[in-house]
Image (cartoon, helix red, strand yellow):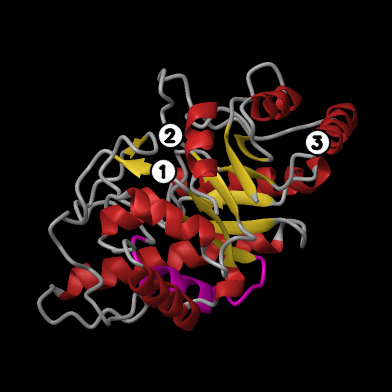
Amino acid sequence: MKIGAHQSIVGNYSQALERIKNIGGNCLQIFSSSPRSWNFTKVDEVQATQFRNKKSELNINPIYFHSSYLINLANEEKIGNLSKLSLISELSVAPKLGIKGSIIHLGSFKNFDKGTNILEPGRSLFNPKLTKLRDRVILSMNKKISVLMKHIFEILEKTPQDSLFIIENAGNNKIGKNLDEIAEIIKQVNNPRVRVCLDTCHLHSAGYDLTTSEKLNKFLNEFDKLIGLQRLELFHINDSRDPFNSGRDRHQNIGEGTINMEVFRLLLNHPKLKHLPFIVETPGFKYQGPDKKNLDILKSLIR
């Protein structure tokens, strides 16, 4: 199985490969640059060759970028443009390093009241017929959706065909907090390069109950119906500091949070999921980032 973690690129990209090997992982996630600044990704051929050779030597595969925390593709001003340019740069570099693509938080619809339910159950993100909301709110929402889609289309148009655009399900009321929203976006984009990363902490936050085989199968059937299981690229496998259906998405070490351990066991052993990479993004038991203990706990659950 593919069990890995997010690791630091301090020093250089190749050192992240050594770090994941040292904690017992065989797949990897990294930032392409600082996640809290607009430093666009650049690599020369020497760096790229060194990384690919080390990746092959240590047999670390697959590898993914995680996009900057600053990304907001629904912003029509400076932040939205920088988000677009950052992802174009990152997705263009990924194939040179043998990296599959970027895992992306799409952003949020700023300036909306947190208590406002823009997308009610069963309603389309692209046709929000909400009679309870004022017309100006609907018009503003539609404009932001249009900006989001325009940015995604341009990013895909300007980046290599073998670089994946991977939407991560969101927590904390951001875009993609439920399967319906993700499905609408994928339907509109209609591009095989668009895939999905599911984060267990964010699913827990959004109220998806996966605590039994029956409930997990129901969830996977819903995912397959709305999005298609062929679009599911990987899992972020994290525990949660917050209660179920809380709307909060703070990660915790495996076994130290509020997610039932049965959820992790069921995911790791499900026949439709066992081929997927599982990437840990926990704080670590010494609070120095994802560590060997987190990976070992997950490995102990595999039948």
Instruction: Work out whether mark 3 precedes mark 1 in sequence or the reverse, and give the earlier one.
Output: 3
Instruction: Work out whether mark 3 precedes mark 2 in sequence or the reverse, and give the earlier one.
Output: 3
Q: Which percent across, then down, holds residue 302?
A: 54, 51
Q: How crowded is mark 1: few (under 14 residues within 10 Å), some or many (20 or more)?
A: many
58 sits left or right of 269 in the view: right
Q: Which amino acid does label 1 sit on?
A: Asn
Q: Does the magenta stretch include residue 213?
A: no
**Furthest residue toward left:** 132
Residue 199 visible to the viewer: no
The quadrant of the image that shows the C terminus is bottom right
Residue bearing the label numbered 3: 55
**Distance CA(mark 3)–CA(mark 1):** 25 Å
Residue bearing the label numbered 1: 238
Instruction: Work out whether mark 2 precedes mark 1 in sequence or the reverse, and give the earlier one.
Output: 1
Marks 2/1 in contact by CB < 8 Å: the verdict is: yes
**Distance CA(mark 3)–CA(mark 2):** 23 Å
Identified at 29% across, 51% down, the residue is 110
Q: Does the magenta stretch include residue 182?
A: yes
Q: What element carries label 2?
A: loop
Magenta stretch, residue numbers: 177-193
Q: Which percent across, then down, holds residue 133?
A: 13, 73
**Furthest residue toward front:** 303
46 sits left or right of 199 in the view: right
Looking at the image, is 122 positioned above or below residue 281? below
Residue bearing the label numbered 2: 282
Q: What residue type is labelled 3?
A: Lys
